[in-house]
Each structure stands twice: as structure tokens, then as C-alpha cells.
Amino acid sequence: MNDSDLDRMLKHAATAAPSAAPRALDELIMARVKVDDGRARRWRSFVQWLLLLAAISGIATAGMVGWSLASRDTTHTTPPTMELFRTGGPQ
């Protein structure tokens, strides 16, 4: 194919009237869109459940780690010694 053939083909394609799709093809396209819509809904539902379970898992893990650290913390098991109690009162 040379330049003149390519130019002629491009000009013909640019000026050609768009052809309408056959009626059977329209029905097939709409059937495919309906099937894809159901598939998209299922995929969206799967992703939402996955995100929800990930959030619940993260909250449960944070709670378990916090409880574990709090149960091993000895800061509040013995009260601090206060100067008032050591000296027997103000003098």
C-alpha cells in the first residue's frame, strides 16, 4: 500500500455514513450488558464484604493487642508512695 492508497482509504472512511447496527446485534448487546451488570453487582458485593471483614479484623486485632499490653502493664498495680504518708503529715 502506498501513500495515495492510504489517503484514498482514509478519505473514504472519513466521509462514509455510519451504518446502523442490525436489530439482532442490538439485542445481543443489551443481553450482554444485562449479564455484565449482574457480574458487576456481584463483584461490588464481594469487594464490600472483603473491606468490611478487613475492617472488623483490624479492629479485633487492635483490641487484642491493646488488651495484651494492658494486662502486662504493672504501672497501676501498686499505688505510688506519697510524701504526705511517708512523713506523717505536715509540720
Image (spheres, rainbow, N blue to C red):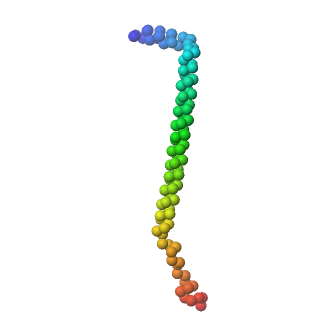
Q: Residue at x 52, y 78 (%)?
A: 80
> Residue 29 is drawn in which quadrant?
top right
- Seen in the picture, residue 39 relative to 31 is either above or below; the reply is below
Toward the viewer: 9 or 70?
70
Percent position of residue 5, x then y: 43, 9
Picture coordinates of residue 62 (x, y %)? 50, 57
Specify whether 3 is left or right of 24.
left
Residue 1 relative to residue 71: left or right: left
Q: Is residue 44 visible?
A: yes
Residue closer to the observer: 88 or 41: 41
Tell me how many marks there are: 0
Q: Is residue 70 above or below residue 30?
A: below
Q: Is residue 83 above or below residue 20?
A: below
| Residue 18 visible in the displayed image | no
Locate the N terminus and report the quarter of the image it occupies: top left
Q: Quadrant of the C terminus?
A: bottom right
Q: Residue at x 52, y 55 (%)?
A: 59
Residue 79 percent across, percent down from the top left:
53, 78
Q: Where in the figure is residue 82, as x and y percent of width and height?
A: 55, 82
Residue at the left extreme, as displayed: 1
**What residue is shown at x 52% (from left), y 41% (from top)?**
47
Give the residue at the far bottom of this rendering.
Answer: 91
